[in-house]
Image (cartoon, rainbow, N blue to C red):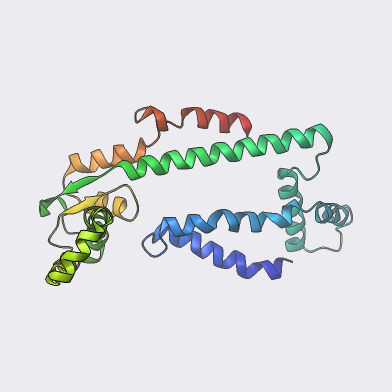
Amino acid sequence: MEESSAPFEYAWSIAKTLNVVKNDFIPTEGYRSVHESASKARSKKFQNVALYHAFKEIKSDNKDLDEPQQRIVEKYLLEGKLSGVDLTGNRKNHFMEASKQLNENRVKFRKNVEMMTKRFRQLLIDPKYIGDMPTHMLKNLSKDKYDLFFVNLCELIIFYFYIVCCIFPEVVNIFALVRSQPTKGPWLITLTNPVYKNFLEYCPERALRWNTWVAYNSRASGHSDKDYSNSVNIENIRMQR
């Protein structure tokens, strides 16, 4: 069983690592879209009642098992216990209800953080605030700026844009030129990675770094929009755990 799941575990561990250390390679949106499915698939084997009791029998007579095999048995028993496999009756129902509420509060928590992350926008025009940021990093800032000021605008006036481009095809070339010159600015600073990390690393202006850092670390807190505060969600998660 462990051998059959090893390729999946190996591939998923690489994906998780890349999402943390090289966010531009695996975008957060794409990673999160499959994260829950991958987590559920991984936990299925630990929630199997028959498998859990089989490992309990193995543990009762494990003298023939070597150390790695004993660790696998302990792992399955621990994960099964944490998943509520050995519970019955009212205790099982209470566990399932608490798990459901816990998952709902986790989802609310994540959505509030995502909403406050998307709200922060800081437009920079002066190149001195960019410092020595490499061109390939500036493309991320320039791309966000392009998406905000051009793509959204085109969605609102797509019909007129189409007519203009048909009559004046050089407009398309102008848009392409703007996108292909990330060193010219302006640049849009957001709280999404890798933009956030790159900006804190290369921006020479302390006040701008501080403002961005505070915005990032106060997302969905009591110091931001009360409608998206996670104070209640955090307390509920703490109690349900």
Which sits in the foreground, 156 or 26?
156
Residue placed at 27% from the left, 60% from the top?
A: 140
Q: Is residue 186 left or right of residue 222?
A: left
Residue 181 seen in render: no
Residue at position x 16%, y 65% from top?
164
Is 204 located above or below residue 185 in the figure?
Answer: above
227 vs 18, nearest the viewer: 227
**32 on left or right of 152:** right
Q: How many marks?
A: 0
Whether residue 110 appears in this view of the structure is: yes
Classify residue 214 as left or right of residue 206.
right
Q: Position of residue 144 (x, y in %)?
A: 27, 56
Picture quarter with the C terminus = top right
**Which residue is nearer to you in this view: 175 or 210?**
175
The percent coordinates of residue 215 (x first, y second) are 30, 38
Q: Nearer the viewer, residue 207 or 27?
A: 27
Residue 145 figure quarter: bottom left
Counting from the top left corner in percent of width and height, residue 108 is at: 50, 38
- What residue is rendered at 87% in x and 59% in y? 63
Whole-percent x, y for residue 35 in the image = 54, 56
Quadrant where the N terminus lies?
A: bottom right
